[in-house]
Image: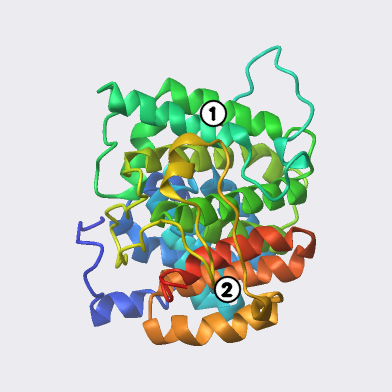
Amino acid sequence: RLRPRPPARSLSPAELMQLEAPCALPHPEVLHGQIQAWPELVRHERAQLRLLGPQAALAECLDAVLPGAGGAAFHPVIRLAHAWPHGEMARAQAMAYARARVMPLPPARVPAGQDMGGTPEEAHPERLPRVIWQAWQAARTRMNASQVPPLAHAGLIAWRMQGWAQTPEHAHFAGQLLQALAGQPAPQALQTLARWAALAYAATGSFTVLHMATASHALIQLHEHVPDAVLWPRHLPALVSAYAAAWLSTARMDLGWGEETAELESQPEAPTGNRTGLGMACTASTVNTADEPGSQETPAQCHTPEAWRQRLLPALLARGDDHDIKLSAALLQRWQADPQAAAVWQQALSRLALKLWPEG
């Protein structure tokens, strides 16, 4: 019988010993979304890893988790990807956490009769698609009209996502995104989502979008571990739904793109404005009135991933914000894997650098 306890409470020695005793659960799904069930789920996942092997156990976990991958601000997939190189216990703990934080949202659906051709990224690969800005403007319009969705001002990212996922704006926007990805195989669709998330972060510096960008790389890593031709297309509508809900939830921010209240140790964002030098951000007026972000300028000494790594990582490590460290690692690895979109990754890294050098 499960004994409720606060998620942040340290485990007792007896509970830690229990984690060493794998025990498969006949119906682990009954514990989904229950963080207090984490120890029991760890034991289950350890048993599955031993019974099925790492790849099959991860595939089974992903099949259960991807429909609600936006739970806890996308941390389920982020932790899974980071834990996978580190052995059985780390894997089991991350898989258990993913199940305990799963948060299903209404999946994206393309309206019947809509044209399924052509992604907006093809026309402007280095700019955020117009449809994404239009969706943000629609969300702002709703809030300005005092039609604020439930939970839109909640303190947790996941709660705000839940609120927006119940709105017609979300259904329309998620359908548009899914339509834009139509015809793309899973690896390409995940890459496209990663590019869009990086561009959205470059334009906003949003803590919510930071999680989207970090999770995008995590999903690509997980796909490399489990390149299942059926699993990923089946869950793409759910992933798109989570991205759409997260993006719409940023409409609560003021036009200066101030930081949202976060459930973790968030740091205040540097305000936007006309800047030069390292990482010029888009201006607040651009965010307010245009459909696409302003340009980004990168100094000559930071035109390669290695130059950025040498310039950025020591300062981020000294600052100690694990969110920024993980984002920088994700962006640098995406740049190396997807050099055709170098300008995209540079824009996002430039925005991140504003936290360190706000005056350029």
Above or below, 313 against 64 in this view is below
Nearest the eye: 298 or 321: 298
Above or below, 315 against 257 in this view is below
Above or below, 217 against 302 in this view is above
Residue holding disc 1:
173
Residue lying furthest top: 113
Question: Is residue 274 something one can see in this rendering?
Answer: yes
User: x, y percentage for residue 278?
Assistant: 54, 72
Residue at 56% x, 46% y: name it.
Answer: 293
Dot 2 surroundings within 10 Å: few (below 14), some, or many (20 or more)? Answer: some
User: x, y percentage for residue 91?
Assistant: 53, 71
Question: First in sequence: mark 1 or mark 2?
Answer: 1
Q: Which amino acid does label 1 sit on?
A: Phe
Question: Is residue 57 something one can see in this rendering?
Answer: no
Q: Which amino acid does label 2 sit on?
A: Ala
Residue holding disc 2:
329
Q: In which quarter of the image is residue 163?
A: top left
Nearest the eye: 90 or 78: 78
User: x, y percentage for residue 308?
Assistant: 62, 78
